[in-house]
Image (spheres, grey):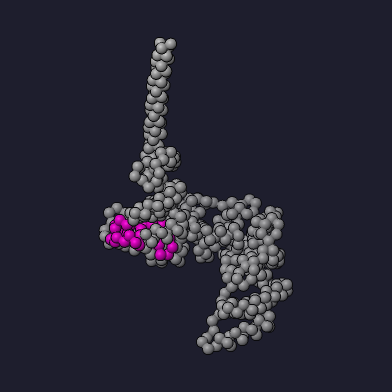
Amino acid sequence: MTCSGMKKHCRWWLFAGLWGLSLVQHPLLASQNISSPEPAGEGNFEAYLSGLRERALNGDPAAARELSVHYDVEGNAAETSKWMSEYVSLAEKRANNGDVDSMLDLGKLFYTGSRLYPKNLERARYWFTRAADSGNAAAQYQVAVMASQGAGGPKDEATAALYYKKSLQTWKKEADDGDSKAALWAALVYERKLVPDSSPEKSVPYLLQAAESGNLTAQGLLAFKYRDGLGVPQDAAKAVEWFEKAASRKDLGAVMELGIMFRDGKYLPPDREKAFHWFEKGAEWKDPYSMAALADMLLEGTPSAEQAARALALYREAAAAGYFPAALKAAELLQNGKGGELDADEAYRLLRRVADATGDPKAMYMLAQVYYTRGDEAQGDSLMKASAQAAYLPAMNRMARLHLLPDSSLPWNPVLSYYYWNQAGEMGDEKAASAAFWLLWGGSGIFLLAIFIIVWRFQRFAARRLAEQQKQEREASDDA
């Protein structure tokens, strides 16, 4: 796993859910699946259902919703539809009587849709607007997002700006009253520059409030700001302090970021022991990225047989958790035996899974090598070509050679060879650039020599023909 890949993961862990969520939704939309009914004690389920029906008939929308879920699980479509419609009817009745929570529930339902009820962005925007105009910050934010995207109604930047401003004002007021989540969202509005005069500096007091209240996301964001000097003076020690606070509560993104900081030494002096500690901690908590990073460290230098075997085990576990770069590393170890095992079949399965799931060019290249070893040149050539077209340098070089080799399964084509080597050279491969140069000029020389020989032979042929004609004409003249 590369350093850049690790960093990408960590930013994803602390940012992607947050930033992605803030692009289209507030936490009010974070859980959209209608929950399953609460379990009842053994032997009491019928009584539990009877109680739900009684509550629903007395106007409780939550009970009607739970009944719809129950009948959906049973496969009873008629009862599912009946109780889902009843839920919407009861929720709308409460919402029309001014219940903001019901407005939000309806907005969420229509915004996301489900198997139990169709998506309807127009109705979602209507109910979010009702809740927003009742002073709910989450709904105000959601209306702004939908207006800026033109979701559920016309795209209206003025309306979006108005509701972003309203959401910020509401969250700031709630933050002043001690609400740490409101403080976080006020900070995010400033960070995303959703209101005029936004700046990284303005988000800091609110991030600090949320972080000091124990909000993990705020702690991670504040750590990044100190690490990179965004709105605050750059301070690696404070970044480590905030990452450690989040890591102590099993925030895996913070754990990974600590490992990377101490391993790479970009922001503070490198400390391999501390890096190993944090990757080890992440691996204990079953974080696949930490497992792969720990395995990478175990293989540094000249690893012992025990270290190599553990690295393979970690790569396998990370791969099983769906981390594809670890699957590639495991496949490599299984192919070359450096992890203490040789298992071509398992390596093939890992490579096949990665190639099929992601189209990763390195996986396709390695898989092509497997097919060549098995004598299946058609499959090998197909994968090698796909890898080369995805700009994987080893595959580009291999394709260039294959198109020049006389006994290759690919047709002889120096033009394609030049193309692959030239492209690889433009990507920084000096050997490929040199090969392209010599192929071009060497090929040009051969081409010119061939033309010279053809022209020379043609001239000789023409001269002989002319001499023969002249001889025949002289003989004819003598006879006359």
Q: Main secondary structure of the magenta part?
A: helix
Quarter location, residue 237: bottom left
Give the quarter of the image for residue 89: bottom right
Asked whether, in this view, residue 405 is left or right of residue 37, the answer is: left
Q: Magenta segment, which residues? A: 318-347
Please tell me how many numbered marks the rendered image carries. Answer: 0
* Residue 209 image point, x, y percent: 55, 61
Q: Is residue 416 above or below residue 182?
A: above
User: Residue pushed farthest right?
Assistant: 97
Residue at 54 percent of width and 62 percent of height: 210
Front residue (pair 126, 381): 381
Q: Position of residue 330 (x, y in %)?
A: 36, 59
Which residue is found at the position 44% from the left and 50% from the top?
A: 386
174 versus 239 height, above or below: below
**Considering the image in quadrants, where does the C terminus appear?**
top left
Q: Is residue 30 magenta?
A: no
Can you see residue 275? no
Specify the farthest residue to the front: 480
Query: Could you say which is closer to the camera, residue 417 or residue 473?
Result: 473
- Residue 244: name its quadrant: bottom left
Find out whether residue 319 is within the magenta segment: yes
Residue 278: x %, y % from top left: 39, 61
Q: Position of residue 455 (x, y in %)?
A: 41, 25
Farthest left residue in view: 305
Residue at x 41% of width, y 16% of height: 472
Q: Quadrant of the N terminus?
A: bottom left
At x 43%, y 58%, the residue is 354
The answer to whether residue 453 shows anywhere in this view is yes
